Amino acid sequence: MNVLLTGATGYVGSNVLTALLAAGHEVLAVTRSESSAQQARETGAKAVVHDLTDTEWLVEQLGTVDAAIHTAATGDEQGPALDDAVVDAVVTAFAGTDKRYLHTSGIWIWGAGRVAEDGPLDPPAIVAWRIERENRVLSADVRATLIAPAIVYGHHSGIVAGVFGEGSRSQDGALRLIGSGDQHWTTVHVEDLADLYVAALTDGPRGRVAAASGHNPSVREIAQAVVGVDGVVLPETPDESRARLGAALADALLVDQQADGALARATWGWVPRRPSLLDDLAV
């Protein structure tokens, strides 16, 4: 299958690219710079440099492939405009066809509690903008599935590595928690997530699918794994975490959430095989 991939040199996208190529797919990587394009080419993809918000151009590129996977993200206020443009192009190019589209969502859209794909959405402010774009995808005549990754880890990168880096230490060396640390995070290894994207290129539900390993450690357990058995962790009040990390990010990280990935397992036979987050941190 010939697959157009956005975000092919990002944290998630680069692992998706590797998994796609290993499965025998051809990949057209749309990148933002020549250096990123060269990185994708060295991996084995065909790569082009262009602005994804150029909808007319993207429609033309989508006409040359069998499927598309959107993992690109700006991580800033430009995110809604990027997804608007990609969704517009996909709906124009893929509506009424058999072409498959995988759109990246996120686990936080369900809010606190145990995730059920058919349950209500209650996103924190940082991801609330996703809902309108995702609903446009789901209401279109497109063979689309929204993959909602849990907190992604692996290769010493991702949210965990970011929020528990050196800047999270107190003056006496204790690792600061986010809030009390009693909340749970649902997690997925980046390579297991990449395997799911590849598996989901076959037919699947027109809706949201949680990409979660089933391992849901508490933030306190995660922090303790970071510092080791003899390390010290330090709880904060929610307001202290908001002041340190910014209110939008902290409010998302304070969400107490669990998921099992059962729909992905049942639909595609997906089996997460990599070490759990706590095991990964212990290495």
Image (cartoon, grey):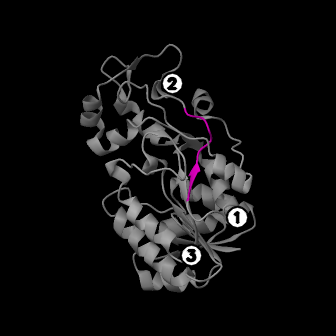
- Percent x, y of residue 79: 37, 62
- Percent x, y of residue 71: 51, 61
Left or right of 15 in this view: 112: left
Instruction: Determine whether 52 is above or below 249 in the image.
Output: below
Sooner in the amino-acid sequence: mark 1 or mark 2: 1
**Tally of numbered discs:** 3
**Circle number at residue 142:** 3
- Percent x, y of residue 58: 48, 80
Front residue of this view, candidates 55 and 165:
55
Q: Nearer the viewer, mark 1 or mark 2?
A: 2
Instruction: Determine whether 43 is above or below 166 in the image.
Output: below
Q: Residue at x 42, y 81 (%)?
A: 55
> Helix or strand or loop: what does disc 1 sit on?
helix
Q: Is residue 51 visible?
A: no
Circle 1 residue: 21
Circle 2 residue: 221
- Percent x, y of residue 47: 57, 73
Front residue of this view, candidates 167 and 243:
243
Q: Residue at x 51, y 57 (%)?
A: 10
Asked if the residue at tag 2 contacts the one at tag 1, i.e. Cβ–Cβ closer than 8 Å, the answer is no
Front residue of this view, candidates 130 and 262:
262
Mark 1 surroundings: few (<14), some (14-19) or many (≥20) residues within 10 A: some
